[in-house]
Amino acid sequence: MNRIDRLYALVEELRAAGPRGRTARQLAGHFEVSVRTVERDLSALGQAGVPLATKQGRSGGYTLDRSMSLPPLNFTPPEATAVAVALSRSQHVLFARDARSALHKIMAAMPERALEEARTAAAKVRLLVQPVPDPDAEIAEQIWRAVRDNQVLRIGYIDVGGVETEREVEPQYVVVGPNGSYLTAWCHLRHDDRVFRMDRITRAERTSTPPRPRQVTPELKVDGHETKLPESALGREDLQPNTDIGVSRAPGTVGATRRTGG
């Protein structure tokens, strides 16, 4: 994580901590840097106008002014349990840190009694763990940024036969599945849509090659599975302030098969 990203993440971590705050040592452990580095970052944030406060004593640490904190969100214990179960399934290298941060924000906004009730309920749930190959974190982040920004990538890829090729691809989707994660893309080498196992991508770098005009891409099956679209859970038409929120739309499922691996 570069320094700019870490400064932003520090503010979010203190926002999530609420009035309990975080010590410099806790923040250093969370971001895997030294205490001295965290203290320099916090000093830079203060000089930039971020309203930080310090608490003295054994439980002392850094807090963010309440004006920059979210008001209570009124999560019920069953809602918090459901969110905890859902976010605990988000172990992909791209989303694990943000899922953890989101859960901390929910916990910081809940009264202690409700939080304990949610913890008790969540302790009654077990998730089946299926080991899957993780992609390299830096390569995965580079791929994700190219997907979001619609940029062409040059990748090294090892196919199922162990042969490595270099190719330019136009990223379309990151697919997270039970057997691993994949990149779907238009391949300039094959002149066709392809699915690439992300753990087989050995390097990824952005290029200056402009992508083709935006195409209507066929829906896909990956590794024998249909896909569903998480953006459907963010549909504006379903949002109701301060009430239970339900997703009325059925998740989009898709069926045409794409060729995998090159």
Image (cartoon, rainbow, N blue to C red):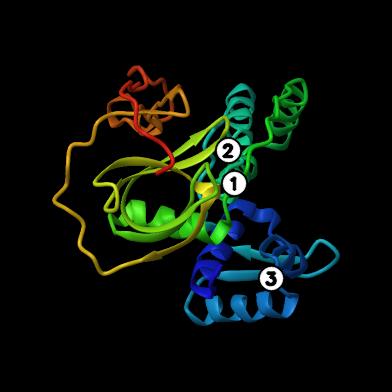
- Which residue type carries mark 1? Ala
- Dot in front, 3 or 1: 1
- Image point (71%, 61%), residue name: 22
Query: On the rendered structure, is 46 left or right of 208?
Result: right
The mark that comes first in sequence, 3 or 2, is 3
Residue 65 visible to an observer of this rendering: no
- Which residue type carries mark 2? Ser
- Image point (35%, 51%), residue name: 147
The CA distance from mark 3 to mark 1 is 29 Å
Residue sitting nearer the eye, 165 or 120: 165
Query: On the rendered structure, is 243 left or right of 66?
Result: left
Give the quarter of the image for residue 89: top right
Residue sitting nearer the eye, 106 or 174: 174
Q: Do the residues labelled 1 and 2 touch (CB within 8 Å)?
A: yes
Q: Which mark is residue 54?
A: 3
Residue tagged 1: 96
Q: Which mark is residue 90?
A: 2
The CA distance from mark 3 to mark 2 is 33 Å
Callout 2 secondary element:
loop
User: Can you say whether 151 is above or below 24 in the image?
Assistant: above
- Image point (35%, 41%), residue name: 194
- Which residue type carries mark 3? Thr
Label 1: few (<14), some or many (≥20) within 10 Å? some
The mark that comes first in sequence, 3 or 1, is 3
- Image point (77%, 26%), residue name: 123
The quarter of the rendered structure image containing the C terminus is: top left
The mark that comes first in sequence, 1 or 2, is 2
